[in-house]
Image: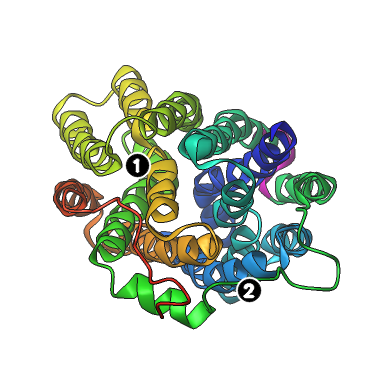
Amino acid sequence: MMQVLLCGGAVVTLSMGIRHGFGLWLQPITQEMGWTRESFAMAIAIQNIAWGIMGIFVGIVADRFGAFRVLLAGAAAYALGLTGMALSTTPTWFALTAGLLIGAAQAGTTYAVVFGVLGRQIPAAKRSWAMGVIAATGSFGQFFMVPVEGALIAQIGWSNALIVLAMLVLIIVPLAFGLREPGFSSSTPRPQREQTVRQAMAEAFRTPSFLLLTAGYFVCGFQVMFIGVHMPSYLKDYGLAPHVASYSLALVGLFNIFGTYIAGNLGQHFPKRYLLAGIYIARSVVTVVFLLVPLSPASVYVFSAAMGFLWLSTVPLTNATVAQIFGIQHLSMLGGFVFFSHQVGSFLGVWLGGYLYDRSGSYDIVWYLSIALGVFAALINLPVREAALQRPTPAAA
């Protein structure tokens, strides 16, 4: 179990740590290349939707053949995408590399794949806790990597910084060997599957609780990606120094370490639907307070710490609930469907931020929308039924 946690945590630290810093590239790239903020935001929005779409198919492959080969392919695609992002000369090429290629790479190197390994290797009594640990490592990646990325941009330029990250992400390759699973041979799929992929999909989509979790995760994606990508530019627009943005994103990552770990622990003892509702409503309250108080470095840091505590704490709770309801056989695939909704929200949060800013000169509308969506997500998580589905036995069927 320890090997799975260490290697899975290190993979997520790298993959999520790198992606959380992409907002730092918005102004350097758009200013040097003469692009609009919407063009940059569109590429990152495509990245999120590509991640969501590919996550479903990657989850099917990982459930059937194991995570090892998926991680190898994802690491290679990530390195190629970062390199292509550095060398892009037009918004179209930037969208293809930073968007499609890196999005597909993230599908194969982040939560859905690693959580599938956890679900199969960690006992149910510790599953929510273990998912909280892995989510916390992704937060540590943000805390550690965002300042590193900011320093790289300042010292060697935005393009060279991306090349360095492309080399760094290949560390996932040796880590993947620590996530090879017994029961998956190199040439044959996992045997004795009680449900086909189609049956599992049909069961999930006629289960109201799955649809409610999926809708709530849409809001999570909208909120975190809008803040993660546009927060640095929002702060710079108000005259705050660039290091304030780097420190704020790092604080999000630091406090998210505690938030995700605590959420995973609490999920073992309390109804996860109440915890999820509390997280979403707290995000809205924190955002309202942030917009009402005078903007200063201190207010930014307090907001970042509070939002960081809530940032990815939905991840272990949502995925553990899916595992609790449907079991672990198709966990990566079902997690991929839920995460697709998250990424649709991410697409809209990133793109609307750039689109509405270019047309209104302000992020205000998106802030207000984020607050309203938080209230909506809190309400729809309350009716979720967490009990395991009772399926007929093969004899009864």
Question: Residue 267 occupies which quadrant of the picture?
Answer: top left
Front-lying residue, 293 or 8: 8
> Callout 1 environment at 10 Å: few (<14), some (14 to 19), or many (20+)?
some
- Which residue is most to the front? 395
- What amino acid is labelled 2 in the image? Trp
Q: Position of residue 87 (x, y in %)?
A: 73, 63
Is 11 colored magenta in this rendering? no
Checking the image for residue 177, the label placed there is: none
Q: Mark 1 points at which residue?
A: 234
Kind of element beneath mark 2: helix
Q: Position of residue 304 (x, y in %)?
A: 37, 28
The dominant secondary structure in magenta is: helix
Which quadrant, please, contains the N terminus?
top right
Question: Residue 164 occupies which quadrant of the picture?
Answer: top right
Residue at the location (86% across, 67% down)?
186
- What amino acid is labelled 1 in the image? Tyr
Q: Can residue 240 be seen in this view?
A: no
Residue at the location (55% across, 56% down)?
112
